[in-house]
Amino acid sequence: MTENKRLRAARESTGSKYHPGECLSRRELAELVNAYLWDHHRQRTTLDDNYVAKLERGTIRWPNARYRAAFRAVLDVRTDADLGFVNSRRPAAPVTERRAVSPVPHQLPAPPLRFTARVDELKELSAACDGTRVADGAVLVISAVAGAGGVGKTALALHWAHRELDRFPDGQLYVDLRGFDPAGPPMPPETAIRGFLDAFGVAPSAIPADLTAQAALYRTLVSGKRMLIILDNARDSAAVEPLLPGSGGCTVIVTSRHHLTGLVARGAHAMRLPMFTPGEAGELLVKHLGAAKVDAEADASAALVRFCAGLPLAISIVAARAGSNPAFPLALLAAELADETGRLDGLDAGEASVRLSSVFSASYRALDDEAADLLRHLGLVPGADVPAAAIAGLTGRPLPRIGRPLRTLEHAHLLQQHRPGRYRMHDLVRLYARDRARTDLSETAQDQAIRRLVGFYLHTAFAAERLLDDHRPSIDLPPPPPGCPPPALGDHAAAVRWFTEEHANLLAAQQCAIRRGWVEEVWRIAWTLNTHHLRHDRRDDNLRVWQPAIDAVTEIRGRSDQADVHRLYGWARIMVGDHGAGMTHLGRALELFRQAGDVAGQARAHEALAAAWEQHGDHRRALAPALQALTLYEGLGRPARIANALNTVGWQYARLGELDQATRYCTAALRLFRRLRYLDAEAYALHSLGYIDHQAARHPDAVRHYRRAVNLLRGAFDPKQEAVVLADLADVYASAHRYPRARRLWLEALALFRQQHRASDIERIERRLAALA
């Protein structure tokens, strides 16, 4: 191997945190890489200066991918090529403008198994697309004859979509609008659009607050793309209209039990899906049971088909029942269904509904006790889908004990594991399960099950929040209800994934608590979501979960808890731009903390008041409560809060131009953050010091602080703040007349801003680049 000059140059251009003004030593580089690997991977390593020297001399092999990522983060470079970890015969690519590439969404659920018939309908879908110019796009409405559920609308749409994926190279979007969900109201259009924007990688901070602006951004993202958009289970045209692209290129498939004449009147292609013919129903039965069994019991098979009234859902459930016991004669199953149908014929529900009820009831009675009990409990679940761990909490059973009944319900076609470990039901099955829960479970049993489910989400969210920020002052929780211990999440990344995946279910759990008047659970769930919401800039969601807490604040036990609700609701108001209402609640929080004699609470209220005035642009008024918070925390001896308060005070002085004071406070904050190994907060203190150094024209120091902040932010997966610091670092290089380096960093920041769709920041950086040109 040859000498690695790039690695040495990168190290020597990185300032030492131990000896300002000097380059990073090999020993320091090794220590920083060791620390990075421990912080981010919990991997203990013992790299030393000798290892770094060998890398620079080229006498040992390049490190593995994880080590290379650590070197990149510590030395503030983007690629392995910047560190010489490339084949020397391949030159590094020149620095050019990096355009942010939006993710290509692939949201389609799995295709249906044993799809049968619908030959004419599949041809009709393809012909409707073929007959529409690409520039125009197509809107195809699949509705059911006579409004029947279970006729196979979603199965048809998904089967066709997976068969025709090549038509849609720019991606596929899917949403279940839950227009006929028995557990709650249909999904609001803004929730559906938000899910689509998330799929495109739009940063929460870039998502507008009102539906009209959200829809405009969504239409901008899909404009000119060849995409498929499936809007499943729409209740009416109003639920669909905000989700339609504004220009051609996309194909939209809408499924509904209604005909959606409003869409058809505006040119959508309508397709009314009929029940299966007896021949088609027989085909599906053969796919499930095999031709030999169906032919051997032809009369019984025909009776089963007849009783299922041409509904694919009913046929699949009946076939699953028969297939679970191959020795069971089909004639007995047919007789059982006939008897059940006779009992239900008096219902004023139409033939299809009666036949489905017959199928559900017969299948339910055939379940063993554990599976039947699980089906009843699943009827109480408020969300559209649920993970296995939450199901265990709902039933109060250990996770291993619910595996067999879950598989039983899957095999009976009463439950679908649509993703590994996550389950959902057809809405008609959910309705049946809900009725069974109300009929077969006592009110006490229902209440206990829902309390366990809410407790599962509250305690798991609390554990996840502690992984996100264990320096945040905690709250007291009672023990979880018996039988629903929260699962171990492991690390910060797992906590972020859990919050992202379970966000809708957490909101649904809070709604359950609201309906039952469980005010302690209502505000505590809001508290557990607070860090996730603020870090991902989900301001509207944050206000939404705090609103019911403030509505019931006088019913909350404990004066300090009431004060905390006022404080956090007040900050939620500040974050959506309602400064007046926010300040009123922050003032009330301070008053209640004083009444309770809660000094730590008073300090938190002063912190919030300082942040509110800073948000309002009044740094002079922010300084007094920031200093007051610092004084109180110093009296309490709480190092992490003292460090945060020091940085807040220093930042206010910096913005007021009092740079010596600012340096003193922010330097003290940085020392304390480092002693505490509070890496996320250390990045913000370094940013403060970088800003101060820039204002004081101490350009080398500003570069050193900003670069270290960028390293930490990359390690913390905080691209929002990383973009801000990169832009500020570029400003420093521009002030020092180092324009090529400034341009490179502005381009890096611009790529991140574009990825996050931050319009004002994009415009600001583009102006700087234009001036540079």
Image: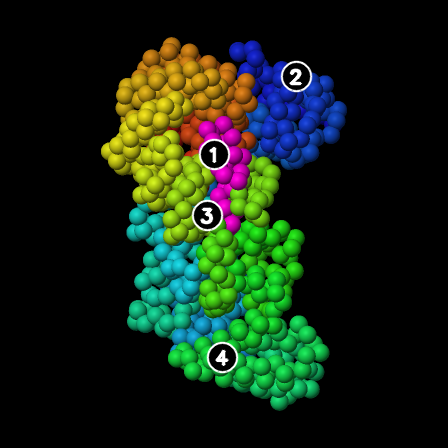
Magenta region: which residues? Answer: 452-479
Where does the image place residue 730, in percent across and percent down from the top left?
43, 25
Check if mark 4's residue and mark 3's residue have beta carbons within 8 Å.
no
Say which quarter of the image contains residue 592.
top left
**Considering the numbered disc 2 on the image, is that residue within a helix, a strand or a loop?**
helix
Residue beneath disc 2:
27
Front: mark 3 or 1: 1
On screen, residue 521 versus residue 479, left or right, reads left
Residue type beneath disc 2: Arg
Check if mark 1's residue and mark 4's residue have beta carbons within 8 Å.
no
Question: At 64% from the left edge and 88% from the top edge, which residue is drawn?
Answer: 298
**Considering the numbered disc 1 on the image, is that residue within a helix, a strand or a loop?**
loop
Residue beneath disc 3:
506
Check if mark 2's residue and mark 1's residue have beta carbons within 8 Å.
no
Residue 47: image tag: none
* Residue 246 visible in the picture: no
Question: At 39% from the left edge and 64% from the top edge, which residue is drawn?
Answer: 179
Q: Residues within 10 Å of mark 1 (few under 14, many from 20)?
A: few
Q: CA distance from mark 3 to mark 1?
A: 19 Å
Marks 2 and 1, the one that precedes in the sequence: 2
Front: mark 4 or 2: 4
Where does the image place residue 614, in percent across and percent down from the top left?
32, 26
Check if mark 4's residue and mark 2's residue have beta carbons within 8 Å.
no
On screen, residue 682 versus residue 597, left or right, reads right
Residue beneath disc 1:
476
Q: Is residue 108 magenta?
A: no
